[in-house]
Amino acid sequence: MAENILLKPTHPVGIVGYGAYVPRYRLPATEVSRIWTDGKGGIPIKEKAVPGLDEDVVTMSIEAARNALGRAGIDPTEIRAVWVGSESHPYAVKPTSTLVAEAIGAVPNVQAADWEFACKAGTEAMVAAIGFVGSQMARYALAVGMDTAQGKPGDALEYTAGAGGAAYLLGPAEESLAVIDHTYSFVTDTPDFWRRAYQKYPEHGQRFTGDPAYFKHIYEAGSTLLEATDTTPEDYKYAVFHQPNTKFPQRVGAMLGFSKEQIETGLLVPVIGNTYAGSAIIGLTAVLDVAEPGDRIMMVSFGSGAGSDAFAITVTDATLERRNQAPRTQDYIARRTEIDYATYARMRGKLVMK
């Protein structure tokens, strides 16, 4: 495979700061089962994170962005782009990115935009930020992937559709706590998951979302990156994949040759659910919280519609001094308040009164 298919900037780029956010409220999967199946049948995860009444993609993105800035230790006015990827932006017409940029003090000399590509909107923004910084149009660019819980009442998605995500401040490699060595993107038109305008909940193609969508795209992106960089799974300490449920990332990891031990650190879906645009990148934050200098990480996202972004990352010495400058991802996961289905329905506006 020709090396020139890799997306590599002219000037090396890395992660200068990163931050996660997970709401404190948790809905056990047994509660969803109790309401819709009388407690019978299997449950795909343990519980999922649910945003509070005063939380949305904007507020959660601000929290994650502030954590990224805390680790980076830079003046926010040096940021030249703020990009937020999500499939649950609070406004149809009104950018999330300008609100985030204002809240963190990055305005007015900044480029801002919202991104979409289902669950890979966050990594899509990261790839664009790498290009922006790598071309030296900007010294720093902020990419965020964040979503709120979505899922039609009683649908299979309601078990796993969680909330949360992560923010990454991309900058020069020499300032980074982790260098992004290579990226590669694989995209086809595969209609496995969609939501038309004015529809409240997304629809999905049942089992079709697996083999022709999730597994094909992650496998092709991951295997191509390995081949093009002349690396093997044994060269990486950790691997992170998009996490719609517990089984899919484990299966695709095995298909690519990664062990369960390489995957488990970044596998957060059992306790916070599928955070959509934040799914893969919040898993990466959990890995960066514990990784040591020299460790190599592979991350592959997936977005329905469909496509995957694959990253090869190497951790630097700077990670040791910066990781404690903001809350760790497991701190947010440990901070939990359990709720029942009625409270969840109220918080998520499931009951519509006319």
Image (spheres, rainbow, N blue to C red):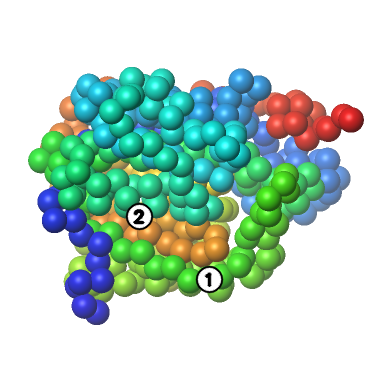
Can residue 260 be seen here? no
Packing grade of label 1 (10 A; few <14, some 14-19, many >=20) is few
Q: Amino acid at mark 1?
A: Asp
Residue located 20% across and 72% down the image: 4
Task: Report whether 313 appears left or right of 164.
Answer: left
Can residue 58 be seen here? yes
Task: Report whether 68 appears left or right of 204.
Answer: left
Looking at the image, which is closer to me, 194 or 222?
Answer: 194
Task: Report whether 240 appears left or right of 323.
Answer: right
Packing grade of label 2 (10 A; few <14, some 14-19, many >=20) is many
Residue located 43% across and 30% down the image: 98
Q: Which residue is mark 1?
A: 189
Looking at the image, which is closer to me, 184 or 82?
Answer: 82
Location of residue 327 in the rendering, given as x and y in whole percent from the top left corner: 37, 24
Location of residue 191 in the rendering, given as x and y in whole percent from the top left corner: 60, 67
Dot in front, 1 or 2: 1
Q: Which of the 4 image quadrants contains residue 352?
A: top right
CA distance for labels 1 and 2: 22 Å
- The quadrant of the rendering that contains the C terminus is top right
Looking at the image, which is closer to me, 164 or 195?
Answer: 195
Q: Amino acid at mark 2?
A: Met
Location of residue 274 in the rendering, given as x and y in whole percent from the top left corner: 56, 46
Location of residue 82 in the rendering, given as x and y in whole percent from the top left corner: 36, 35
Q: Which residue is mark 2?
A: 299
Looking at the image, which is closer to me, 116 or 68?
Answer: 116
Residue located 83% across and 46% down the image: 36
The kind of secondary structure element at disc 1 is: loop
Q: Are marks 1 and 2 in contact (CB under 8 Å)?
A: no
